[in-house]
Image: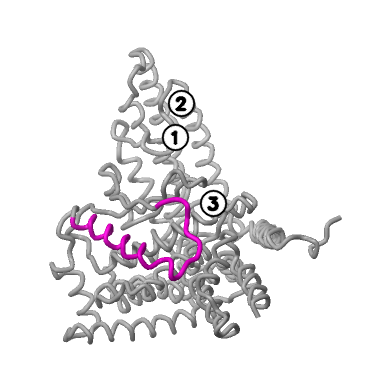
Amino acid sequence: SITYKALSATDKLAYDVFKKNQEDAIKGFSKELMALTVVRPLNHFSGLHTFYPTFASGKGAAPFKTVEDYENNLKRHKEFVVMLDRSIERFRQGMSTGVVETKMTIRNVIEQLDTQLNQGLEKSTFMGPVQNFPDGMSDADKSRLTAEYKKAVSEEIFPAYKRLRDFLKEDYLWVARDGVGLSYMKGGKKLYRYMIESTTTLPLTPEEIHETGLKEVARIRGDMEKVKKEVGFKGTLAEFFNHLRTDPKFKPKSREWLTQGYYDLGKQVDKKIDRLFKRLPKSKLEIRPYEPFREKFEAGGSYQSGSPDGKRPGVFYFNAYDLPSRTTPGMTTLYLHEGAPGHHFQISLAQENEALPAFMRFGGNTAYVEGWALYGEKLGFEMDMFGDPYQRQGHYDDEMLRAMRLVVDTGIHSKGWTREKSIQYMLDNSAMGKTDATAEVERYIAIPSQAVAYKIGALTIQRLRDKSEKALGEKFDIREFHDQVLNTGALPLAVLEKKIDDWIAVQK
């Protein structure tokens, strides 16, 4: 047998990561916790009832190039109907054990199902594939498939949607819980504690996270007040937020102007990045606007990874749709987060490291991946990227959102906060509009704990840096520290801390 002590440094890390991941999975699949999750098979944020229509629409991931592709989709439709009916069975099990969803969630799901049903057959998302046949398909196949799709949607999918919708409205809604947080659900407190530890990859409690969030919100408000004073704005923070949202000078002038702005940011980072990193990705980073066919439905920006061999570049996508609705103060922070040194550096350096096992090169966890991207935003200060006070304010806006998530997620699920109180808290402490704040809060209700991982990850990486600087003094090298954080993939934060502690000991 091989002892842990005999393993190489990389293999020890691989063992630690694998062990942590499997222990977490085993705990999540325990009979006790599974009894709290499988009986709530879908909600307004996630579930086959909303995922599958897009997948099977002809615009999703399912292929529609051959007759066989179209026939395979019909087979999946039958399985989809089975899953919808099985969801009813799962919900009934929860009714019998007292483990039920929130009324708010169920009302939202009913609305989603009604939207699908009210489309009617011809406008149904499921009919998309037979309204856009590929070139070369025979008229006979087109006619046959169109008839079969109409029958599947009208006689199988729509009735299954209606069965689920009627069950939720007539039977389940009456027993669904009023309180939106998990603390109102039987077994919910224990489930939330597990979810917190699983998501953050650290042994933290909801109470600790809540207090951390309150402190961060107060600190960031102070930073925002300084910016307001620096630019000479007379008024409250709320009025300052509104000024930034509505003043025409904070709107992009054109698609070309926005594109050039991101190109310029990329050049600024490229000139200064080597002062912070000793190892750069092989994969280049391209900057592109979203394509017209999808820009309406995308976020403000995102990252698409390049190839592990570095031949295909990574891509930072930004959104140039509906320019009057967009503002410019967040541009620098968005590029640092999605591009360099955020997701592009972290993902590229991991997958390009062939010395790592595949699950470390290509795996990940939200706390590390998003934590690094948030930490990367802050590195903009060290690259002199925030000389413009309005870009600094844009940074604080984004940082505030992540800090508020610590407060609101834990407030909802461990302190009994209502949906309305949570929305108001976000409105009181940020530049968000009510629509966005409502969407955020309803996301936290649907997927507890996920949103806290971002800020916890960033705070942990910063804490490890502070620890390293204090322990090593003049021996501390920021480029070496960043290499230690990035060169072994997306580690659980507890494993990352152990790695940094070992590195500090060697450096001493």
C-alpha distance separating marks 3 and 2: 34 Å
Q: What secondary structure predominates along the stretch shown in magenta?
A: helix
C-alpha distance separating marks 2 and 1: 8 Å
Give whichever of 406, 233 is nearer the camera.
233
| Secondary structure of residue under mark 3 | loop
Which residue is labeled 1 in the image?
A: 62
- Name which residue type carries label 2: Asp
By what rule are the colours in the image chosen? one colour
**For residue 127, which quarter of the picture?**
top left
- Name which residue type carries label 3: Glu
Give whichever of 44, 311 is nearer the camera.
311
Label 1 near label 2: C-beta < 8 Å? yes
* Residue mark closest to the camera, 3 vs 2: 3
Residue found at the very far right of the displayed protein: 1
Residue 37 in the image: above or below residue 193: above
| Secondary structure of residue under mark 2 | helix
- Name which residue type carries label 1: Ala
Position in image of residue 263 (x %, y %): 28, 57
Q: Is residue 34 left or right of residue 225?
A: right
Which residue is labeled 3 in the image?
A: 352
Is tag 1's residue or tag 3's residue first in the polypeptide sequence? 1
**For residue 30, which quarter of the picture?**
bottom right
Range of magenta residues:
257-284
C-alpha distance separating marks 1 and 3: 29 Å
Label 3 near label 1: C-beta < 8 Å? no
Q: Is residue 279 left or right of residue 336?
A: right
